[in-house]
Every structure is written in structure tokens, then in C-alpha cells.
Image (tube, rainbow, N blue to C red):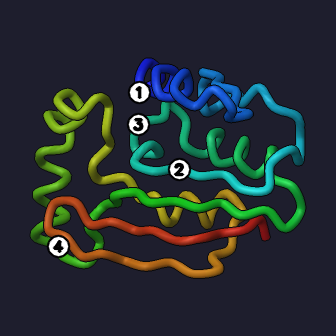
């Protein structure tokens, strides 16, 4: 994706955009330096989810927002939650490290965020949450 972003950035010569690659657990930015943080389909693959969320909190300015869209563990169906748990190891191998059955919403709450709003999109194997949260 970084290669694609660089190619697209070259097409936008007037844009004031700087691309940086860094581990989510060690963001190379100053404290309180961003108005907003955005994660889409990424939290399931980070090595240390609590540390990643702590870094997001650290770089957000007071009043900043954390916007997210992530698939989550299926807690609404015992059967489909069990299916997720059963296929999780193979899914992780095939899905670039994706933790299919991760409790992402709970992790966001445990990291000290409060939800402005959150939506749940039902799904059997891959339910999704999306919304906006702020540091509590």
C-alpha cells in the first residue's frame, strides 16, 4: 500500500503530504500532534493492540478523535463465534496476520477511549464495527 500511496502522491504534486512508515506500537510523532487518527482494517494485525491504542491516544490533541472501521469477534452468536475461534489460526496465516476473533471494541474501551458513536454491522464470520471515539 505504501508503494501505491507514493505513486499516487507523485500525481498530486501540489499536495502537502508526507508519507512515513512506522510500527503502530511506536509512532514517530510528538505527543498531542494530531486532530484525528484513523484506522481501517488494521487493528487486527498489529503485534500489540493495547500499545497501539496507547500510541493513538498519545498523539491525539485534546478533543481529538479516533475514527475506526474494524472487523471484530462475533460475540452475538455462540455458533459463529465458535466458527471464528476454530478457523482463526488458518485465517491469520492466510489473512496477513489478521486476528479474526479479536475483541477490538473492548480493547478500544480498555485503552481509555469513550465512544461518541459506534455502529455494529452484523456478519457471521466477520462482523464489523465503525465509529468515533475520544480519549476519556
Label 1 element class:
loop
- List x then y, in percent, for residue 2: 47, 23
The residue labelled by disc 2 is: 39
Callout in the foreground (1, 2): 1
The residue labelled by disc 1 is: 1
Label 2 element class:
strand
Query: From mark 3 to mark 2, how far is it between C-alphas?
Result: 11 Å
10 Å crowding of disc 4: few (<14), some (14-19), many (20+): few
10 Å crowding of disc 2: few (<14), some (14-19), many (20+): few
- List x then y, in percent, for residue 63: 84, 67
10 Å crowding of disc 3: few (<14), some (14-19), many (20+): some
Q: Earlier in the sequence, mark 3 or mark 2?
A: 2
Disc count in the image? 4
- List x then y, in percent, for residue 25: 64, 31
Q: Which mark is residue 77?
A: none
- List x then y, in percent, for residue 65: 71, 64
The residue labelled by disc 4 is: 78
Query: From mark 4 to mark 3, how far is it between C-alphas?
Result: 24 Å
Q: Earlier in the sequence, mark 4 or mark 3?
A: 3
Amino acid at each position: 500500500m505504501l508503494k501505491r500511496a507514493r505513486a499516487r502522491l507523485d500525481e498530486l504534486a501540489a499536495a502537502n503530504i508526507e508519507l512515513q512508515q512506522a510500527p503502530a506500537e511506536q509512532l514517530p510523532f510528538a505527543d498531542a500532534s494530531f486532530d484525528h487518527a484513523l484506522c481501517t482494517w488494521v487493528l487486527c494485525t498489529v503485534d500489540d493492540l493495547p500499545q497501539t491504542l496507547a500510541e493513538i491516544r498519545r498523539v491525539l490533541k485534546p478533543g481529538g478523535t479516533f475514527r475506526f472501521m474494524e472487523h471484530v469477534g462475533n460475540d452475538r452468536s455462540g455458533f459463529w463465534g465458535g466458527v471464528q475461534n476454530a478457523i482463526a489460526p488458518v485465517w491469520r496465516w492466510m489473512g496477513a496476520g489478521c486476528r479474526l476473533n479479536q475483541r477490538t471494541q473492548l480493547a478500544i474501551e480498555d485503552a481509555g477511549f469513550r465512544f461518541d458513536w459506534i455502529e455494529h454491522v452484523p456478519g457471521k464470520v466477520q462482523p464489523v464495527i465503525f465509529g468515533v471515539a475520544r480519549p476519556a
